[in-house]
Image (cartoon, rainbow, N blue to C red):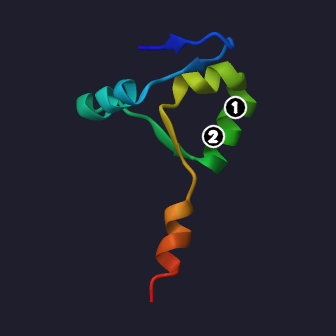
Amino acid sequence: MWNQDTSNYMYKSIDDINECVRDGSVRVVIIKVMLGVSEKLGMYGALRKVDAVATGTSGTMISCIP
């Protein structure tokens, strides 16, 4: 599931994340939580633990709807 590209960092493809959504194992956190996870586990530990980070932009967009 994990891939490693030539710039030596880990990433998950959209297909990898979609598979986690389908099987119910997806782990999504908000950016504030991700900062705490990365402080506790380090960058690579956080990348292994979390599948996607919600940035909260939809809240801003929704608040602009009349």
Quadrant housing the N terminus: top left
Residue at numbered disc 1: 38
The image's mark for residue 34 is 2
Q: Position of residue 22 (x, y in %)?
A: 24, 32
Using the image as rendered, state which of residue 60 and residue 50 is in the foreground.
Answer: 60
Amino acid tagged 2: Met
Q: Position of residue 15 (x, y in %)?
A: 35, 26
**Residue drawn at 44 percent across, 35 percent down:** 27
Using the image as rendered, state which of residue 49 and residue 10 is in the foreground.
Answer: 10
In the figure, is residue 56 to the left or right of 66?
right
**Residue drawn at 55 percent across, 61 percent down:** 57
In the figure, is residue 14 to the left or right of 52?
left
Rendered image quadrant of residue 9: top right
Q: Residues within 10 Å of mark 2 (few under 14, many from 20)?
A: many
Rendered image quadrant of residue 33: top right
Q: Position of residue 47 (x, y in %)?
A: 59, 25
Q: Secondary structure at mark 2?
A: helix
In the figure, is residue 17 to the left or right of 10?
left
- Residue with the most extreme left position: 22
Q: Are marks 1 and 2 in contact (CB under 8 Å)?
A: yes
- Residue with the most extreme front position: 6
- Residue with the most extreme bottom position: 66
Label 1, label 2: how far apart the Cα atoms are = 6 Å
**Residue drawn at 69 percent across, 39 percent down:** 36
> Does residue 33 sit above or below 19 in this rendering?
below
Q: How many marks?
A: 2
> Does residue 60 sit above or below 3 in this rendering?
below
Amino acid tagged 1: Ser
Quadrant housing the C terminus: bottom left
Q: Secondary structure at mark 1?
A: helix
> Does residue 4 sit above or below 35 in this rendering?
above
